[in-house]
Image (tube, coloured by chain):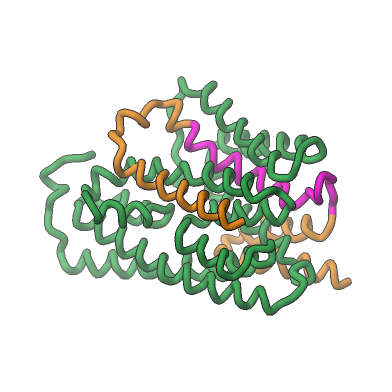
Amino acid sequence: MWAAVLVACGGCYLLKLAGLSVPPAVLAHPVVSRTADLIPVALLAALLTVQVLASGSALVVDARLVGLAVAVVALLLRAPFLVVVFAAALAAALVRAL
Amino acid sequence: MPDTGPLDAPLPPADRSRILRDSAGVAVATGLYGVSFGAISVASGLSVLQSCALSLLMFTGASQFALVGVVAGGGSAWSGAASAALLGTRNTLYGLRLAPLLQHRGPRRLLAAHLVIDESTAMAATRESRAAARTGFWATGLGIFALWNLATLVGALAGNALGDPRAYGLDAAVGGAFLALLWPRLDSRGHRLVAVLAAAVALGLVPLTAAGVPVLGAAGVALLVGALSAARRPGRTA
């Protein structure tokens, strides 16, 4: 675990440093900027889906989906990040306690 | 936009204190949610020390949540690391935008690089002078760095004391965190389409592959759509 944590930290730092150091022409290509723009969208959507619906290699509908639905409502109401996260956790915990 | 004249203008004290005030507000709001990262990280099986190391050394929230999210789902630490690095690529683009504004060299650039994140970029990229951009960047970056790390420690210690994370819905909290990070990026039809496609690909891969792989597979959607739509004007996210 430590090795992966430290390598990922190093990688993330070098990615930041590259942006400040590399001549813009190298990365200003439209394919690169368009793709880099989409990567967070695709990854976060996938992480979210797996986090809420996967349990090992099975797809499961449980209290986590209720938590996500509450998070959607909180975001529609323009709640700040911490409120969204807390509301999702509280909703799932309540469903489990029933 | 890079126009040497106005870019080198001095920063009036009133503007400076306004930027510092705004930066402090952003730093408090952002730094505090380090509590949720710390709690979720230890609930995912990382130690308090590993959680703090991530906030100290990785210092880019979405990547940190990605790493612990993949590990919590049973994925290997390395697929978590790969997801974190892929999410970190957006900081490279931020750096490209910041470099001509900040114009830092040597050790100062090495330090500045560590603080290149969503919020510090947002508080610097829109400024009209170099002094204003530097003030916004450093005040926001350093403020978040201090609070984010403090909050991570608090969250990790509290999470450790809580016991079974599922009873508190912490697994659902991770989903909520990813959604909150994704939400502001769903600002165009293209982005919403990519999000739905990526979610579908990940869902399809869950029963077929080892944990952690579905997320990386979904990144392929971004590569494919990015390559196919390159002819169109690149969109922007906040």
Residue B193 seen from this side: yes
> Left or right: where does residue A90 sit relative to residue B22?
right
Residue A76 seen from this side: no
What's the magenta region?
A35-61
Chain B is shown in which shade? Answer: green
Q: Residue A62 is drawn in which quadrant?
A: bottom right
> Left or right: where does residue B144 sit relative to residue A6?
left
Position above or below: B212 against B54: above
Furthest residue in direction right, as rendered: A98
Residue B92 image position (x, y, % from top left): 40, 42
Most common secondary structure along the magenta stretch: helix
Residue B148 image position (x, y, % from top left): 47, 67
**In the rendered picture of this protein, how many numbered marks are placed on residues?**
0
Residue A60 in magenta?
yes
Chain A is shown in which shade? Answer: orange
Q: Residue at x 40, y 46 (%)?
A: A14
Q: Nearer the viewer, residue B40 or B10?
A: B40
